[in-house]
Amino acid sequence: MTQTTPCLICERRVHPNRTRNVCGAAVCDQCEVSNMENLWHHRGGRLVYDMSTATGGRDQASVSTQWMLEGRTDVPGELQLKLTREGLGKKLGKLFGKKELQVDDPLFDDLVHVSVAPGQRPLAAEFLSHEGVLSVIMELVSMGGQLWIRGAEFKSDGVSNRMLNPQELGLLGSVLLTHLQRFAQNGGRWDDQV
């Protein structure tokens, strides 16, 4: 019997050679080249992404890419989060007792500052207990971005000092949107690590 792997986005089972790892998620070759905006529109959700790149400097070697990513699932949720890069000011705030949600992943906790309302802490901690969610958030934040999650919607934007691929940005958004949708469908918890 041939081994197959489910695609996180479309859920089709395909041969492992026809998938690619995107932030810990198997994505099939069809989804990888699909228009993610159309895919989510047909699912009753929405995914929009855009970017502009400028080069500069004497030798045109300096690159700046401004990007935006927004998504909404068709499944309502209650999660409310703001995730930003952990800068010096936020690190100093921690030293002086300012509380921040920690996920006990040293790489994530050192890179990402998690702002959450006190009543949302258990729900946010559950959402952030998923390895795939942490991976996509770290990728977006390392690209110079910040991320807001409000119920069934998310918005992320940033400025990166490297060239970005629009298809890659769409895949990241689609992976995050799939995780948000499954989390909401499971009533704000992970039954299994999808």
Image (cartoon, grey):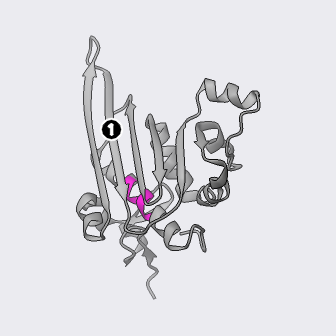
Q: Is residue 164 above or below residue 175?
A: above
Image location of residue 143, percent across then percent down: 43, 37
The answer to whether residue 56 is above or below residue 85 is above
Q: State how many labels appear.
A: 1
Q: Main secondary structure of the magenta part?
A: helix
Q: Residue 175: image x %, image y %?
A: 42, 59
User: How many residues crowd mark 1 within 10 Å: few (<14), some (14–19), many (20+)?
Assistant: many
Q: Position of residue 109 (x, y in %)?
A: 65, 42
> Of helix, strand and loop, which one carries label 1?
strand
Q: Residue at x 26, y 14 (%)?
A: 59
193 falls in the magenta region: no
The one of 27 and 152 positioned closer to us in this rendering: 152
Q: Residue at label 1?
A: 67
Residue 137: image location, x then y, percent? 50, 48
Q: Is residue 162 left or right of residue 85?
A: left
Q: Amino acid at mark 1?
A: Trp
Quadrant in the picture for residue 50:
top left
Q: Is residue 23 left or right of residue 117?
A: left
Furthest residue toward bottom: 1
* 99 or 165, nearer to the observer: 99
Q: Name the one closer to the observer, 138 or 185.
A: 185
Instruction: Residue at 44%, 75% (x, y): give it.
Output: 6
In percent of the image, x 39 and y 32: which residue is there? 160
Of all residues, the one furthest to the top in this rendering is 58
The answer to which image quadrant residue 46 occupies is: bottom left
Residue span colored magenta: 173-178
Where residue 16 sits, quadrant-wise, is: bottom left
Left or right of 158, for residue 42: left
